[in-house]
Amino acid sequence: MAPATSWLNAWTGTLAALRANGVRRTVKQILMIDQPRVGRFVGKDDYGNEYYENRDEIVLRDRWVEYKKWNPDATQVPAEWHQWLHHITDDVPTPQTVPKPFFSPPHVENLTGSEGAFKTYNTTVPKYNAWKPATKERQG
């Protein structure tokens, strides 16, 4: 009985998301977060990520982010929104509630594996050089 119930709950949840969000946003949610969800829009960060909340959901699964980029990564969420997502604070981050110190650098996502990844630059002379085979011209 449990598998049929879970299938029915998933289907009714998808229908509710289609009714509330529309086809395009529901398909995007399925592709991005594997599950269509319905909730109240809470805010948007500087990078275009949108944050939602649904208090009718299970505790600690009632807040989520919909990333602007198609390659979602947890490092794309700024620290103040990370605190809100993980229930460290209930205050929605705004420029008034989260003053930035003048010396803090802007948030940057993890760029490992991309063109912007950090690459070391070595100035030391190597102890050993790679072997280069000597070749002679053929006579003939």
Image (tube, rainbow, N blue to C red):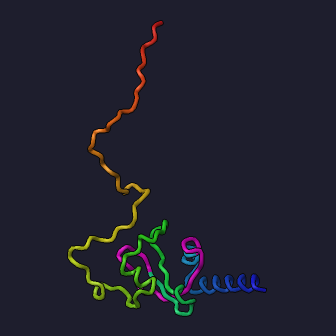
Above or below, 121 relative to 79: above
View extreme (left): residue: 102
- Spot occupied by residue 137 in the image (x, y as percentages of width and height): 42, 13
Farthest residue toward the bottom?
A: 56
For residue 34, which quarter of the picture?
A: bottom right
- From the viewer's side, name the closer residue of 31 and 137: 137
Q: Which stretch appears magenta?
A: 30-50
Residue in the image at 33% along x and 71% along y: 107
| Residue at point 75%, 85% (across, down) | 2
Q: Position of residue 138 (x, y in %)?
A: 46, 11
Left or right, 134 with reference to 60: left
As drawn, is 14 to the left or to the right of 71?
Answer: right
Which quadrant of the figure has residue 132? top left
- Camera-nearest residue between 131 and 7: 131
Q: In the image shown, does 85 or 132 lie closer to the viewer?
A: 132
Left or right: 45, with 29 as reference point: left
Residue 53 at x, y = what percent?
A: 49, 87
At a point 55% along the width and 74% down the height, the residue shown is: 33
Q: Position of residue 119 (x, y in %)?
A: 35, 52
